[in-house]
Image: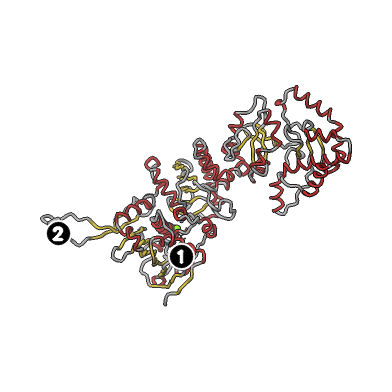
Amino acid sequence: MTAEVHGFQTEVAKLLNLLANSLYSNKEVFLRELISNASDAIDKLHFLSLTNPDLVKDDPTFKIRIKADKENKTITISDNGLGMTLAEANEHLGTIAKSGTEDFLKHMTGDAQKDSQLIGQFGVGFYSAFIVADKVTVLSRSATVSADEGVSWESTGEGTFTSENIHRDRRGTDIILHIKDSESEFLDSWRLRSAITKYSDHISVPVELWEEKYEAPAEGEDANTPKEPKFEYVQVNDAKALWTRAPKEIKDEEYKEFYKHLSSDYQDPLTWAHNKVEGELEYTSLLYIPRQAPWDLYTRDNKHGLKLFVHRVFIMDEAEQFLPAYLRFVKGLVDTNALPLNVSRELLQESAVTRKLKKALTKRVLNMLDKLSKTDDYKIFWQQFGNVLKEGPVEDYSNQEAVLKLLRFASTTDESAEQHVSLEDYVSRMKEKQQHIYYLTADSYQAAVSSPYLEQLKSKGIEVLLMWERVDEWLMGNVREFDGKTFISVTASDLQLGDLQDSEEQKKQEESVEQNKDLIERFKQVLGDKVQDVKVSTRLIDSPSCVVGEGGRMMTAQMRRIMEAAGQKLPDEKYILEINPKHALVEKAAAETDNERFAKWAEVIFAQALLTDQGTLKDPSAFVKVLNSLLVG
Ligand code: ADP
Ligand code: MG
């Protein structure tokens, strides 16, 4: 058989081009990726061998070996893991399986340093070999096939690769890198050793490096006599899975490196928690909070989850059963003795152990976030993951209060769009007689901070939480209270200030209603069934009017758009118009004796209220016409 030539998937070709032509500040990442792949392949075979021990009986000791050959300018990374069949090699080393390739390429900035950092994050690990190699040869044999079904795969990374069946005596994979002249430093044993140590220290399989053997001169022998150097494989890591070690013996650097291996993230994590639990339900968990949200955090069909180990044997990736969806940004692993080694996804779903673990791990994450929330890094976390966490109070009723504590908002006291205000902060600042937590949802940050609905509360010094994210309206529609205080929307038609209004104010208010009775009647008459009702407002100071919804909540324009986009029929909302009789515009209208002109003023005052609330009008040109006729006339 002769080698067949294949074209790379377009995305891969683009990527390879990028890899070859960019300047990398951190070229040694190729070792992380290739060692990681070798370790994955061993994990997979280890798992299969549990039910089929014959697969490994000819070569039962798992290991990864790395050998530099200065003469031929190659580095070979070998493993005795699962290996690949010809079809698998063609598929896995010619395409990018993950659906995010497009996204990956979009993230490319053209800034070589930043781009190189992205590698690995998107599952393009193998191709990083081309950072240092101008040709890559892969020899492999799947543990499930015979010696005649070995594979040879080769590419110079320029659009095509060749592959064919070969005879190969042993299972597993050799990745042979033909090192570029400019990268020959990696052929030096000291250079290689330092990088390999870094990337393999936490890996549970032995990693052995081909090194020159030091031989003490024999007795009577002249130490200066030149000798043929002898080489041997030397184990460079202690091959103990990181999470099985005692937490206090593990350095931060080791936790960080392990995170990168585990998550294919290039950045350090924000924080982590490593726990060993004994007793009824034994497990070890190592959970990390990333520093940056992955591109697919909101892609519903993409899997997120922990790595599952049973008795230290890798069982599966992305086991989403161990954490609720609102914590899907957490990376890490759980290792337990309480599940059988042959556990399947289906079995996991139904297992009582899974449910217990999920409960315990959720608590761990919430604790970890609580700790983080007392540090400056929480700001980074909130920027990246705040909107996901806001799904929590609704999704996870049993932890509602704990998750609510972790949320952050902007407010009339601290308007920063970065959102620094916790509900505990809010409650601690509540006025003496204040019973409720007031909030406003709006279409945008700008609309929120300058909303007329805030005027009265602001003038009384009552803090209002400001919200403008998509998820906020849904969140506030589904939670009732925090710390025994109910949430009240400031757009509620019957905004109750209760004891916050003293009797003096209430009296004035009643007087104002009485005094403006006729004016209200006139408004009602001319606006007819365009409005549900007209009232004297208690919340306005600087604005002439506003609209409020029936029964407390009003759908924001944003929510309307979401519903419209989802093809849902919108309820035909009729608003209550509130007017501010002290405002000059309303006074001017009130003074108008010509009824036709009054109707126009009423129209404008109503349209302004709608415009402030929703940012649009159904018929803007009609509004402009009416307004102009008043301005000119
Ligand atoms: P990822 O590791 O995220 O899947 P990579 O680009 O690193 O992405 O590897 C692509 C695929 O190639 C792997 O998923 C695996 O199927 C295959 N592969 C790579 N290296 C090896 C290896 N040493 N042994 C067996 N399969 C491998
Ligand atoms: Mg990989």
Mark 1 neighbour density, 10 Å: few (under 14) some (14–19) many (20 or more): many
Residue 556 versus residue 303 in the image, above or below: above
Indicate the quadrant containing the N terminus: top left, top right, bottom left or bottom right: bottom left
Name the N-terminal-most of marks 2 and 1.
Answer: 1
Q: Is 226 situated left or right of 399 in this image? A: left
Mark 2 CB near ligand 1 (8 Å cut):
no
**Which residue is at the front of the view, 46 or 622?**
622
Percent position (x, y) of residue 71? 28, 65
**Which residue is at the front of the view, 587 or 630?**
630
Which numbered disc, 2 or 1, marks the residue closer to the eye? Answer: 2
Residue drawn 62% across and 35% down?
Answer: 411
Element at badge 1?
loop
Residue drawn 70% across and 53% down?
Answer: 565
From where the camera sits, is residue 120 visible? no
Residue 178 versus residue 514 in the image, above or below: below
Mark 1 CB near ligand 1 (8 Å cut):
yes
**Which residue is at the front of the view, 433 or 232?**
433
Percent position (x, y) of residue 391? 61, 44
Element at badge 2?
loop
**Which residue is at the front of the view, 581 or 501?**
581
Mark 2 neighbour density, 10 Å: few (under 14) some (14–19) many (20 or more): few
Which residue does the numbered mark 2 point to in the structure image?
225
Which residue does the numbered mark 1 point to in the structure image?
93
Indicate the quadrant containing the C terminus: top left, top right, bottom left or bottom right: top right
Q: Amino acid at mark 1?
A: Leu
Q: Outermost residue, left direction?
A: 220
Q: Amino acid at mark 2?
A: Thr
Residue drawn 53% across and 44% down?
Answer: 356
Residue 574 versus residue 229 in the image, above or below: above
